[in-house]
Structures are given as C-alpha cells and as structure tokens.
Image: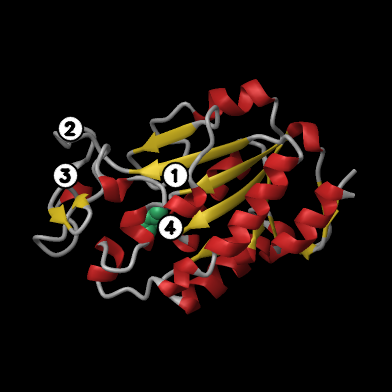
Amino acid sequence: MPVVDAEPGPFEFQTDSTALLVIDMQRDFLMPGGFGESLGNDVSQLRRTIGPLAALLAAWRGAGLPVIHTREGHLPDLSDCPPAKLTRGAPSQRIGDPGAFGRILIRGEYGHDIIDELQPLDGEPVIDKPGKGAFYATNLQNILDKYQAKSLIVTGVTTEVCVHTTVREANDRGYECLVPADCVGSYFPEFQQAGLKMIAAQGGIFGWVGASPSLITAIQE
Ligand code: C5J
C-alpha cells in the first residue's frame, strides 16, 4: 500500500480508491493582471503551486489514476449566486462585473477557466461549483461513488477557503484527505500556514498534510 510522509503521521491509501481533486486553478485567481491581483493580492503566492501540481498531475495521470477539476463560478444571469455573495466586496470588482479576462467568475468567460498549464484532459470531470466547497450544489459525490473513492488528494486554491471547505466536508462524508502543502496556495502566507496546521492538528482532525514529492514516490514504487 502506498504510504506518504505526512502530519500527523503516515498517510496510507489504496490507488484503486483514491482520486486527485484540483480545486479552482482558474485564471481569475492566478493570472497576473486578473481579478485576484486587482484586489491587491500577491498572485505569486498561488502561482508557486503550478510547478509541483503539474508534476503531480503528470505522475498521477501516468499511473492511470482519476483526476477531478473544479471551477468556482456562476451562470451569466447570476441566478445561482446568492445576494449575500454577490454584494460582497468592492463595487466594480464583484462577481459578474467586467474584468481583465471577461466577466469575473462567470462560466464561459476566459478568466473563469483553468490556467493553461493545468488544463484538464479529455474525460477528466470538471465540476462547476457556485460555492466554496466542491460538494455544495454539484455532482461530486456521484463522481466519487463511481470511482469507489475512499481517499482524496486535495490540491488547488485557496488553502483557507475552497480547499478547506472541501476538505472539511469530505472529512464529514467519510473520506480520508491528504493535502500536499506545496500544491495548495493562499494569497496570505499566514493563512497558508494556519490553514495547513488546522487540517493536521489534534491527530488529523480534518486530514493529513504532506508534500507532493513523497506522494509521487509512493505511487511510482
Ligand atoms: C477559492 C476564493 N477558490 N478564495 N475562492 O478559494 O474566493
């Protein structure tokens, strides 16, 4: 059984019941000049995940294991965006407003799609989610049931928002989650650090935290 060095202890998983989740690696969040940067965020804090994640994806795909991507966003008429979410943030930089890469976080716009470096392959599910968590108002549970998944490798952005919300709910739904620290990113270094600590604290209250090199080695052994 593959074993990954992790906190709070070794993470063991079966390759035939583990899926790799890639959360919201979208241009709106990661591209220089885009929505994330326009809010004053340092996108390099997210972009450092691209190299490790590309290497993990290559190894994971090479082993023939399932990959699921998500994108946070909304319908063009915003009918799936609750007012409480829509009215959050500075006017002109809200969901649906025109941004550098099209309407911000709107499905079908250039900025809403996944960055070129991590584009999904044909056949890999891409889940469009209106919330922060990947289970809310999506068919993720059905997809995981189809794969008979018991464990999840959760990667992407941002650590303390969509990654955390997804890991917390996955944990409640009975999945064992490993978060490779180098494959998740936050605009805020202190949130990255605290977010990772919170997952592995108290004996792994939400899951395990490791790093991609050990995970890649484990699936190639
Ligand atoms: C994600 C966000 N993907 N930070 N969204 O974390 O608003």
The reply to whether the residue tagged 4 has its Cβ within 8 angstroms of ligand 1 is yes
Q: Secondary structure at mark 3?
A: helix
Q: List the residue tagged with mark 3.
A: 83
Per the model, the C-alpha gap separating discs 3 and 4 is 19 Å
Q: Mark 1 and 3 residues: CB-CB less than 8 Å, in contact?
A: no
- On the image, the x and y values in percent for residue 221 come to 90, 49
The reply to whether the residue tagged 2 has its Cβ within 8 angstroms of ligand 1 is no
Mark 2 vs 4, N-terminal side: 2
Q: Residue at x 70, y 25 (%)?
A: 148
Specify the amino acid type for callout 3: Pro
Mark 1 vs 3, N-terminal side: 3
Per the model, the C-alpha gap separating discs 4 and 1 is 8 Å
Specify the amino acid type for callout 4: Val
Mark 2 crowd level (few <14, some 14–19, many ≥20, 10 Å Cα): few
The reply to whether the residue tagged 1 has its Cβ within 8 angstroms of ligand 1 is no
Q: Secondary structure at mark 2?
A: loop
Mark 3 crowd level (few <14, some 14–19, many ≥20, 10 Å Cα): few
Q: Residue at x 47, y 67 (%)?
A: 47
Per the model, the C-alpha gap separating discs 2 and 4 is 22 Å
Per the model, the C-alpha gap separating discs 2 and 3 is 9 Å
Mark 1 vs 2, N-terminal side: 2
Mark 3 vs 4, N-terminal side: 3
Please state which of the two labelled residues, at mark 2 or mark 3, is closer to the viewer.
Answer: 2
| Quarter of the image where the N terminus is located | top right
Q: Residue furthest left?
A: 91
Q: List the residue tagged with mark 2.
A: 79
Q: Name the disc covering residue 161, or none.
A: 4
Specify the amino acid type for callout 2: Ser
- On the image, the x and y values in percent for residue 218 come to 84, 52
- On the image, the x and y values in percent for residue 199 come to 62, 60
Q: List the residue tagged with mark 1.
A: 133
Q: Secondary structure at mark 4?
A: helix
